Amino acid sequence: VHGTRLAMEYLHSLGHRRIAFLGNEAHAGVADRLRTYGEFLREHDLPSPAEYVRRAIRSGGEAIVGATELVRLHRPPTALLSPSDALALGAMSGVWQTGRQIPQDISIMGYDDIDEGRDSFPSLTTVRQPTDVMAREAMALLAGLIESASDGNARPPGVSVEPELIVRASCAPPGSEG
C-alpha cells in the first residue's frame, strides 16, 4: 500500500492526472495495490474511467496488448502504473509498437526493481521492495513462531518494511496533451 502511494504521489507530482493501472489482481499484493490506486484517484478527484484499468494481465504478451489498447483510447492516459516490473516492461514494448515514445507520450512505472528494469531503455522508474530485509524478517518471524508454539502463543507480531521509490528515465511530466 505504501509503495503504491509512493508511485501515485510521484506521478501526480509530475503533473499526471490520467493514470492507468495494468496488472493481475490475482497475484499476491496486487489487489491491495489496485485498491490503493483507486483510493488515490478518488482522494485527488482524478478521473478513473473503467477503461484505464486492466486487472487480469498475466504475462508480458498480455501487457503488450493492454498497453496498446490504453494508448489507442480516444483520451489515453498520460501515465501507466503496473504493480510488477515484468508487466511494466511488456507495457513498454506495447507502447513502442504503437510508435509512441516513453516518457514523452506516456510515463510508465513498475514495482519490484528487477534487473531487467534497470537495464531497459528507457530505464524503468519503479518501487523497490527490500526483499533482503523481508526475507530476514520472515525468517525471524518463523523462528519466533516455532519458539512460541510450545507456549501456545503462536500469534506473530506485525512487521512492516519500507519500500523505496527508484526514479529512472521512464517517467516525466505529461506533454502538452496531458
Image: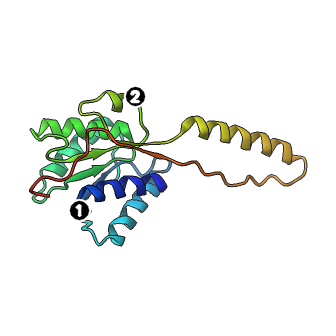
Q: With 120 as the anchor, is 132 left or right in this view?
A: right
Of the residues shown, which amino acid type is indicated by label 1? Arg
Q: Which residue is mark 1?
A: 17
**Amino acid type assigned to the residue bearing label 2 in the image:** Asp
Residues 156 and 7: in front is: 7
Q: Residue at x 40, y 57 (%)?
A: 34
Disc nearer the start of the sequence (2/1): 1
Q: Residues within 10 Å of mark 2 (few under 14, many from 20)?
A: few
Residue 141 spot, x, y in % from top left: 73, 44
Secondary structure beneath label 2: helix
Residue at the disc numbered 2: 115
Q: Position of residue 119 (x, y in %)?
A: 32, 27
Q: What residue is shown at x 29% (from left), y 59% (from top)?
A: 12
Quadrant where the C terminus lies? Answer: bottom left
The residue positioned 77% from the left and 55% from the top of the image is 155
Task: Classify residue 76 by image quadrant.
Answer: bottom left
Distance Cα–Cα, label 2 vs label 1: 29 Å
> Percent x, y for residue 63?
28, 41
Determine the residue positioned at 80% across, 52% down.
Answer: 154
**Residue 73 found in image quarter:** bottom left
Residue with the most extreme right position: 151
Question: In the rendered image, which quarter is residue 138 located in?
Answer: top right
